Image (cartoon, rainbow, N blue to C red):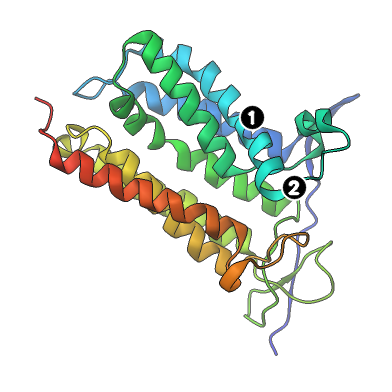
Amino acid sequence: MFPVIAFPAIDPVALEIGPFALRWYALAYIGGIVLGWWLARRLCALPPVAATREQVDDAVTWVTLGIILGGRLGYVLFYRPGFYITAPWEALYVWQGGMSFHGGMLGVVIALLWFCRRRGLDPFLFADRVVTVVPIGLFLGRLANFANGELWGRVTDVPWAMVFPHGGPEPRHPSQLYQAFLEGVCLFALLMVLVRIPAIRARPGLLSGVFLCGYGVARLVGEVFRQPDAHLGFLVAGITMGQLLSLPMIAVGVWLILRARARPALA
């Protein structure tokens, strides 16, 4: 039996000034949006131009709303169905925790479709540049999960197992770090390589499809090591809710890739 690594004592509050407290999770959202915005402005300028820098600036507000509202409502619908029936207004209490990536993704899709329609932009071309920066936020979000000591992994005896403060006495996989690497580092590296290839940028929807497939596969793998939510447990055939929600993502991603390849490339 290998010695268990002690979970580092990390204060969930990153910065506290008087009554104001900035938590790591909020800092991850802010950092992901700001860094993604900065990079998206440059990527959208690559030919074929997806949007002007000013249009990217305008889109940030709608994307942020899509992330927050979609992420929270997705969590309520996917992970806590029926929990807020007695007090439905509490579903909007985002400060109480609980966000869903799949819900946030749907929120962003709706926001981008609405924005592109109003601005006369190609939604597939614009989305291709936006999804390329999403892994930045995913990476920071998983690190915040680790700092908070939440969403820990399943019981294991691997040499790097940790005992999490609220995860019981058993050593567990630090699955937050696995997912940060898969959903953040690996997916970001892949998309950064592909977005630099003119032939790929010329096929609207292709990068979006790669992102959906890449995230879906990364989530399927990461959930193998992650402890399912206690109130949900394992679903049919032993899969988790995160895996179940990732399957349609992969299907849509494959459709987008095939669609992009079947259509003429942009000049």
Q: Which residue is nearer to you in this view: 93 or 1?
A: 93
Location of residue 58 with respect to 253 vertically, above or below: above
Per the model, the C-alpha gap separating discs 2 and 1 is 17 Å
Q: Residue at x 79, y 77 (%)?
A: 170
Q: In the image, 96: left or right of 214?
A: right
Label number found at residue 90? none
Residue bearing the label numbered 1: 68
Q: Residue at x 74, y 75 (%)?
A: 171
Quick one: label 2 or label 1, which is nearer the N terminus?
1
Q: Residue at x 64, y 29 (%)?
A: 68
Residue bearing the label numbered 2: 80
Q: Position of residue 135 (x, y in %)?
A: 47, 43
Q: Position of residue 231 (x, y in %)?
A: 78, 59
Q: In the image, 221: left or right of 15?
A: left
Place residue 217 in its image quadrant: bottom left
Q: Exactly how many numbered labels are in the figure?
A: 2
Place residue 99 in its image quadrant: top right
Q: Residue at x 46, y 38 (%)?
A: 134
- Dot 2: element: loop
Q: In the image, 206: left or right of 78?
A: left
**Residue type at the position of mark 2:** Arg
Question: CB atoms at circles 2 and 1 under 8 Å apart?
Answer: no
Report the quarter where the C terminus lies: top left
Q: Which marked residue is nearer to the observer: mark 2 or mark 1?
A: 2
- Dot 1: element: helix
Report the quarter where the N terminus lies: bottom right
Q: Which residue is nearer to you in this view: 228 or 39?
A: 228
Label 1 CA crowd tier, 10 Å (few <14, some 14–19, many 20+): many
Q: Position of residue 156 (x, y in %)?
A: 67, 79
Label 2 CA crowd tier, 10 Å (few <14, some 14–19, many 20+): some
**Residue type at the position of mark 1:** Ile
Q: Is residue 208 visible?
A: yes
